[in-house]
Image (spheres, helix red, strand yellow):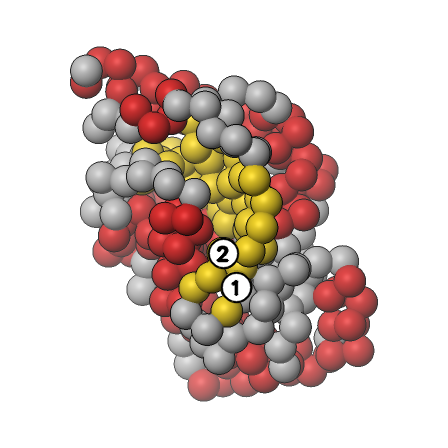
Amino acid sequence: MTTSSSSQMIKPAWSGMVPVDDTELAVTDTGGAGLPVIYLNGSYASQRHWKRVIADLADGYRHIAFDERARGRSKLSADYSFDACLRDIDAVLAARGVDQVLLVGWSYGALLGVRWAHRNPERALGVVGVDGPYPVGWTTDAEHEEIRKVFHRMRLFIPLARRLGMAARFSGEQHVEVAIEAHLLHAALTPVLETMPVPVRYVEASGEGLGSRDDLQEQMRKSLDPLLVSNPNLKVGAKVASNHGSILRKDSPAVAGVVRELAASVSTQGQAGR
């Protein structure tokens, strides 16, 4: 794989709205001549959570972040599906004139990054998955009912979570639908990871996050182990002490370090391919 020459051209910084389907997405592009990196948020999160990672990486990269539909400063839509989120990545990259890109995703965003990269291997330089994606998910009606119960218990906190950039501006039931679809996609992830043709580096958190219990999230992380053996493109770049919800806040230097290492590897491969 060779990196695009567009990464060597100086691009001006820009922020604004990018139209896609029936909505508009709030996008921030730092510009510059560095390797393009696109940041993909957690299920209901906004781009604000990447500020520490971007600051840790500093200059030398072209940082592109955006708010998904009904998150952050982006507008509402009639479609909040996973496929819509994949189209949003396409729209943002097209609007900013980016062909090849390094994808960095947290949680749901990591799932987006891996799925997009699998569909677009000639455009994906690599993926950094921040505590995800793992090939396990809840698929039964009983498990989906448990998801509904979790959101019902958290319903009074959603307005506050919106102000913190951790909840979307759509209904509680739509939050549930996004979560269930994500679980189903995670459960079907093994064939994708087995055949992933581009490098994926995981930054694994520790312990359990909000809404989890027992050692559920640690078991999810362990589900990756057989795939690390079968596909050499998959590696754990770092294991940190913070949990799923706090990893970008407490361990941003570790995330930035893994991004930096993968970017260096990609640049070396690009030079060798010329």
| Element type at mark 1 | strand
Query: Which comes before the other along the chain, label 2 or label 1?
Result: 2
Q: Residue at x 63, y 55 (%)?
A: 46
In the foreground, 24 or 241:
24
| Element type at mark 2 | strand
In the visual, does 8 lie left or right of 48? left
Q: Which residue is drawn at 49% across and 56% down?
A: 18
Circle 1 residues within 10 Å: few <14, some 14–19, many ≥20 = many
**In the depicted structure, whether residue 226 falls above or below residue 274:** below
Checking the image for residue 229, the label placed there is none
Image quarter hosting the N terminus: top left
**Residue 160: horizontal and vertical position, in percent?**
80, 67
**In the depicted structure, whether residue 93 falls above or below residue 18:** above
In the foreground, 223 or 8:
8
Residue kind at label 2, given as amino acid type: Val
Q: In which quarter of the image is residue 35?
A: top left
In the visual, does 186 lie left or right of 260? left
Residue kind at label 1, given as amino acid type: Glu
Image quarter hosting the C terminus: top left
Q: Mark 1 points at which residue?
A: 24
**In the depicted structure, whether residue 209 falls above or below residue 248:** below
In the visual, does 95 lie left or right of 158? left
What's the distance in space between the residues labelled 2 and 1, CA to CA? Answer: 5 Å
Could one spot residue 137 in this view of the protein? Answer: no
